[in-house]
Amino acid sequence: MRVRTMLAMASVLWVLSGCRQYPASECEKYLAAVDVSVRVPMDDSSNSAVPLNNQQVIAGTLAPPATLQIKRAAVQIGNSGGAAQGKIALKLCQDEHCTIGKAALAGSKDNEYLPVTLESEFSLRQGGGVVRYELARESGDDKLVVWVYPAQGKASLTINGNPENKTLNLMLYQR
């Protein structure tokens, strides 16, 4: 099982690095509609649900997992079986560069990733500074939770002003 996981990771890293070595037209020719995703490093042996109420913000940091041109992101949520309403906003920053994306909860799936389309492409550099993020509940009721996991590496999370050694389950997508 471990060998299969390592082979899968190696092929993803090859696509991530290999595609950026060629003109965009070549990448599109061979990877047409393929999104490449990278999950933020974490210990997925345990998790916990953290409520994200109206106007609440959860902030965190993480070490950049790879050099990526991020078009969208996704965060794992729990929506009380589809009952949660409203919108969230996700802000990503590295060094002085930031972008934001928003997503409506309508139609989201419980305990799955909620896709967040970013307003502008975000250039994430593995050799750059720490990535800072904020997940904000812009509107809605009290039925939304986000799934957090024990952090690995330089990741941290601040919940209600308290720093914790946890991280959101974030997925970053490049095309």
Image (cartoon, helix red, strand yellow):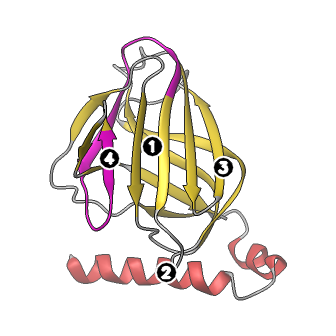
**Tag 3's secondary structure?**
strand
Marks 2, 4: nearer the viewer = 4
Which residue is depicted at the point 28% across and 31% down?
50
**Does 9 sit left or right of 67 as displayed?**
left
Magenta stretch in the rendered image: 137-158
Which picture quadrant has residue 33?
Answer: bottom right
Which residue is depicted at the point 31% across and 30% down?
160
Which residue is depicted at the point 32% across and 41% down?
158
Which residue is depicted at the point 25% across and 57% down?
151
**What residue did someone put label 2 on?**
13
Amino acid type at image mark 4: Leu
Amino acid type at image mark 3: Thr
Give the class, few, some or many, for how many residues have Cα within 10 Å of label 1's Cα (few <14, many ≥20): many
Quarter placement of the N terminus: bottom left
Residue 145 colored magenta?
yes
**What residue did someone put label 3 on?**
99
Mark 1 or mark 2: which comes first in sequence? 2
Marks 2, 3: nearer the viewer = 3
- The answer for how far apart the CA atoms under marks 2 and 4 are is 26 Å
**What residue did someone put label 1 on?**
75
Amino acid type at image mark 1: Val
Mark 1 or mark 4: which comes first in sequence? 1
Amino acid type at image mark 2: Leu
Give the label on residue 48, or none.
none
Give the class, few, some or many, for how many residues have Cα within 10 Å of label 3's Cα (few <14, many ≥20): some
Q: How far across and how far down the image is residue 106, in percent? A: 55, 21
Residue 46 colored magenta?
no
- The answer for how far apart the CA atoms under marks 1 and 3 are is 16 Å
**Tag 4's secondary structure?**
strand
